[in-house]
Image (cartoon, grey):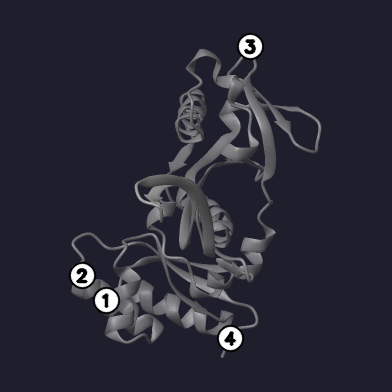
Amino acid sequence: MIPTDPVYITIVRWPEGYTLAEQVAAVAESTGLDPHGARQRVAKGVPAVVQRTDADTASAMMAALKARRVMALAVPERTLQAVAKPILLKRLVPAIGAPEPMFLAEPWRDAACGVRAADVFLLIRAKIRAVIRGDTQTDTYTAPVASPFGGMMVTQVSETYRYDRDQRTEVIDMYMRDGTAYRIMGSKFNFDGLGDERGYSDNENADKLACMIAESAPGCFIDTEFSSFGCPSAYYRHWRSSSKAKEIRSEEGAFEFYSPWRFLLTKALARRN
């Protein structure tokens, strides 16, 4: 049965010295998964979402994990949805002459504002992958062919084939200590704030920008683990769209789950430390 108020059971950290067999047993016992399913949940390491369930069942699962000394977190869907949606930025530049490290953030829709580097809580640096598959693509080019009158002649040749195109979007989500969030997407961002350090690709520039922010805000948390994240299956439907001409499989839906989930997880860990 699909839960109406879903909760995502997240393994945060295993007890020191826990073997793979103990990890699988803990997940199987607490969630009711068979050993094979439990092994798949722990295969990519932690933190990891190991089960999607309802609020009542989540309490029993958390109690079973606590009994095994496993650090875990129950994240309700409504709590995820309550996290502030990131404000899309088109420019972020250092505030020259400011009394402390600051940036001038220029959103696409709202007025520009100052951002104190000391208020940056979490930086998520990720690449969102999309695979675009088309039924056919036709290329036309000139090529030498045999002439019916002998010898060779140049003519136009058309070739039709299926195609796959792999696209990656460079993303930085920047969460502030008050919960405000800003998003930088390489294809929709002006990297001129890097000055002479600006490179030629979105990938290079996003890395340099993330480093610039992190160096100005040494107290912030940094996350680069999206590529190894196993998204809950309920979010798979956001990965795929199709038409007669092409099919698109995108990780965008997975990242829309991952970003607020990682923010909530980091807040919980910060309170415990």
Q: Name the secondary structure under disc 2.
A: helix
Could you tell me the amino acid type at mark 4?
Answer: Ile
Could you tell me the amino acid type at mark 2?
Answer: Leu
Q: Are marks 2 and 1 in contact (CB under 8 Å)?
A: yes
User: What is the distance, in whole Å, between disc 4 and disc 1 at their CAs?
Assistant: 24 Å
Against 233, residue 219 (above or below) is above
Closer to the camera in the image, 242 or 178: 242
Q: Nearer the viewer, mark 1 or mark 3?
A: 3
CA neighbours of label 2 inside 10 A, class few (<14), some (14 to 19), many (20+): few
What residue is drawn where x is 63% and y is 28%?
190
The residue pinned by badge 2 equals: 20
* Image spot of residue 92 (x, y percent): 64, 27
Against 153, residue 56 (above or below) is below
What residue is drawn where x is 74% and y is 28%?
113
Query: Which residue is outermost to the bottom?
Result: 1
Closer to the camera in the image, 204 or 121: 204
Q: Name the secondary structure under disc 4.
A: loop
The residue pinned by badge 3 equals: 96
The residue pinned by badge 1 equals: 24
Q: Along the horizontal axis of the image, is 250 left or right of 65?
A: right
User: What is the distance, in whole Å, between disc 4 and disc 3 at their CAs?
Assistant: 53 Å
CA neighbours of label 4 inside 10 A, class few (<14), some (14 to 19), many (20+): few
Residue 2 badge: 4
